[in-house]
Image (cartoon, rainbow, N blue to C red):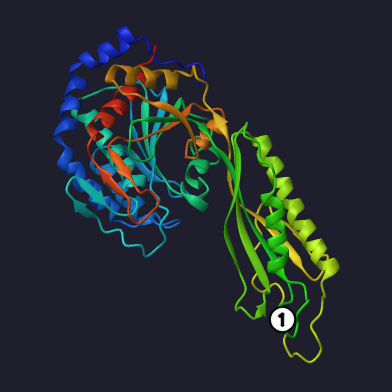
């Protein structure tokens, strides 16, 4: 499987594809189905798919996959939707994928509003437009009567966004049916044509919790304070000199704790986001985070009081607000202040070689269609196969969009047809065999 290489001779392969009657019929179908795709876009966007609750949308996509004639439609153990379009032979095997979930919490109003050529709704460009493209591609291939040498898997994944931690793609390649690998993985993520993400941005996310006895801000002044200790830890960590090459970053995005302005908190938490192009830098950041937290707690325990003043009548239930442990956690209980460091996200880094057949095929198609692209780094479903050494990219599904991850998100179909043509040609080129 690893020795498979598509035909990428531009004079022969692309020209023969563009001249084929089936391809022209598929292109014509794409041009004629705009209003249908707009209706599909609205209908799917209005099915909520908040983090960890994608089932309703997944079942609808499974129904549509069956309706348009894809075979062996199923939901796997993690909730991914998988369907197949057989080729003339079992291999090569190519996955074209899009993620089902949105970043928006349960209860978000996902009703679509149309303003001229634009559609407005949370999640409409990231990633409803990608899901709709899966359906459109399968229909266009059938409309052209196109037979491929290998098999295409159409996959709608769960858990791409935020704390979903790429759980859908991770399951596919580590515990699911693609553990043995595939010949290519193409993720359709968001709108646009200008980017090819061939390098996976690695990231690790942590929740740090510091727990203490709590007390009254006046009567118990001087007792160890979780917020003070966590603040010192954050200040130290934020002074870490992250390198510019390989590019590395960190962020503390959420800080929580306490119950009132005149109470010494029983706990304080913060969430840390660490990113780098190289796995080694993530390890260094992780070590620095542990050192910063441990030293801040040790200092607080050594310098602060550990018991309440007599007669205050104020007590606290220690640890009652501490989160449950998980893989990658570390904890300390050596003093009145305790801390817990939980790894809540881990997205591996990876890179597709510049001369990889998958990338060469996309570039060949882009040159013939007049599409100008640039290679980018991002964190997408492609992180997982790339980290395992499998050929993978993430690209836009076409069209235009903006305001992603905000209530003002929008999508405009202009350019969607070109995006669908691009993906269809790339799939045919990859699945043409030797």
Q: Which residue is mark 1?
A: 215
Specify whether residue 151 is in view: yes
| Residue 193 x/y as whole percent | 33, 31
Quadrant position of residue 234: bottom right
The C terminus lies in quadrant: top left
| Residue 195 x/y as whole percent | 40, 31
Q: On the rendered structure, is 90 left or right of 318?
A: left
The correct choice, above or below, for 66 with respect to 327 in the image is above
| Residue 415 x/y as whole percent | 24, 33
User: Could you tell me how many numbered marks the image carries?
Assistant: 1
Quadrant position of residue 411: top left
The correct choice, above or below, for 149 with respect to 239 in the image is above
The correct choice, above or below, for 65 with respect to 422 in the image is below
| Residue 128 x/y as whole percent | 32, 46
Residue lying at 82% horizontally and 62% vertically, measured from the top left: 298
Residue lying at 82% horizontally and 67% vertically, measured from the top left: 301
- Circle 1 crowding by C-alpha within 10 Å: few under 14, some 14–19, many from 20: many
The correct choice, above or below, for 259 with respect to 423 in the image is below
* Front-lying residue, 76 or 317: 317
User: In what element is the residue under mark 1?
Assistant: strand
* Front-lying residue, 245 or 319: 245
* Front-lying residue, 241 or 393: 241
Seen from this angle, which residue lies furthest right?
302
* Front-lying residue, 320 or 61: 320
């Amino acid at each position: 499987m690893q020795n498979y290489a598509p035909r990428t001779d531009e004079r022969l392969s692309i020209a023969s594809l563009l001249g084929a009657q089936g391809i022209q019929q598929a292109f014509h179908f794409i041009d004629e189905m705009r209003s249908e795709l707009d209706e599909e876009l609205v209908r799917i966007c209005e099915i909520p798919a908040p983090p960890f609750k994608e089932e309703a949308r997944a079942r609808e996509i499974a129904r549509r996959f069956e309706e348009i004639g894809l075979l062996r439609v199923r939901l796997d153990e993690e909730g991914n939707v998988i369907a197949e379009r057989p080729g003339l032979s079992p291999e090569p095997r190519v996955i074209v994928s899009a993620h089902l979930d949105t970043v928006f919490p349960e209860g978000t109003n996902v009703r679509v509003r149309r303003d001229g050529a634009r559609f407005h709704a949370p999640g409409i460009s990231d990633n409803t437009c990608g899901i709709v493209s899966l359906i459109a591609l399968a229909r266009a291939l059938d409309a052209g009567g196109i037979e491929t040498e290998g098999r295409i898997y159409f996959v709608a994944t769960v858990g791409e966004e935020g704390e979903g931690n790429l759980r859908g793609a991770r399951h596919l390649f580590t515990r699911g049916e693609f553990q043995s690998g595939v010949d290519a993985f193409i993720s359709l993520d968001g709108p646009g044509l200008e980017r090819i993400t061939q390098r996976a941005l690695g990231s690790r996310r942590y929740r740090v919790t510091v727990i203490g006895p709590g007390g009254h801000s006046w009567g118990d002044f001087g007792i160890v304070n979780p917020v003070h200790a966590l603040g010192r830890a954050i200040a130290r960590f934020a002074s870490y000199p992250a390198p510019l090459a390989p590019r590395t970053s960190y962020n503390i995005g959420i800080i929580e704790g306490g119950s009132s302005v005149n109470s010494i908190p029983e706990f304080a938490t913060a969430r840390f986001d660490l990113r780098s192009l190289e796995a080694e830098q993530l390890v260094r950041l992780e070590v620095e985070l542990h050192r910063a937290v441990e030293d801040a707690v040790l200092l607080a325990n050594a310098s602060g009081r550990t018991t309440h003043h007599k007669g205050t009548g104020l007590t606290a239930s220690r640890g009652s607000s501490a989160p449950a442990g998980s893989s990658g956690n570390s904890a300390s209980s050596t003093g009145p202040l305790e801390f817990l460091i939980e790894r809540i996200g881990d997205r591996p880094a990876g890179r597709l070689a510049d001369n990889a057949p998958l990338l060469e095929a996309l570039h060949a198609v882009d040159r013939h269609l007049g599409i100008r692209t640039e290679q980018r780094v991002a964190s997408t479903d492609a992180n997982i196969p790339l980290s395992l050494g499998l050929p993978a990219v993430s690209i836009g599904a076409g069209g235009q969009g903006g305001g992603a991850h905000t209530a003002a998100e929008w999508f405009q179909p202009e350019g969607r047809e070109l995006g669908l043509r691009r993906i269809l040609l790339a799939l045919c080129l990859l699945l043409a065999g030797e």
